[in-house]
Image (cartoon, helix red, strand yellow):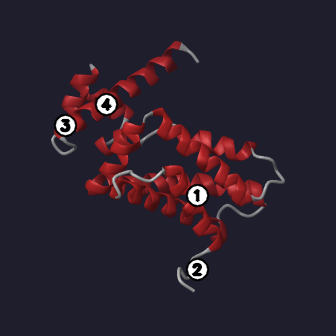
Amino acid sequence: MGLRERKKIKTREAIRAATYALVREQGYDATTIEQIADRAEVSPSTVFRYFPTKEDIVLTDEYDPILLEELRSRPADEPWPDSIRHVMREAVRTGVEEDMEVARLRTHLMVQVPAVRSRMMESMSVTGRMLCTAIAERTGRDPDSLEVRVWAMSLMGGLMETSLYWAENDHRDDLTTLVDRTLTTLQQGLTPENP
């Protein structure tokens, strides 16, 4: 990685760190782009160059391409649900282990701030379209087929609800276990709890 690319990453991280610190100190709504820029020691226009909206600062990460590559690297004969489960477990482990406090803050803001939740839904839609490509490569299906799109977006919706559930319940459950439950529900459907 060249110096320019390293500088970009460092700037993005400084903007994110400034945002998280300010949100913890004074709340999301009270935090302005100007304050974020000042804390990160960049100009407001630099903040907007890296993140079009304040919501993007909170939500944007670099995991989507990594997830796609991880899916592509799974054994070709591995059942698709097993591949997804493995990759999702790794994603949760990486995301939460990297910074549990940030993971909790992000999901808390998704619950508390409608604009963050709305932007998260848009972001997950983009991730879902990327997932369609991976599913198509793996299954030989058309990435634009109804079945592929429904499965991918069902997964995205399930993961969104899992994140909200985790935050609404004060992050007391293990997130990997919740993601496993989500994937099991998508794979097996709902069965009566008390047959």
Query: Can you tell which quarter of the image residue 15 is in?
Result: top left
Q: Residue at x 43, y 55 (%)?
A: 163
Asked if residue 13 lies left or right of residue 20, the reply is right
Residue located beneath label 4 in the image: 47
- The amino acid type found where label 2 is placed reads Thr
Q: Looking at the image, is mark 3 or mark 2 nearer the viewer?
A: 2
Q: Residue at x 64, y 47 (%)?
A: 87
Residue located beneath label 3 in the image: 32
Asked if residue 71 lies left or right of residue 155, the reply is right
Residue located beneath label 1 in the image: 180
* Element class at badge 4: helix
Mark 3 near mark 2, Cβ–Cβ under 8 Å? no
* Element class at badge 3: loop
Query: Can you tell which quarter of the image residue 99 is in?
Result: top left
User: What x and y, as percent, mark residue 108?
Assistant: 32, 50
Q: Looking at the image, is mark 4 or mark 2 nearer the viewer?
A: 2
Q: Looking at the image, is mark 3 or mark 4 nearer the viewer?
A: 3
- The amino acid type found where label 4 is placed reads Val
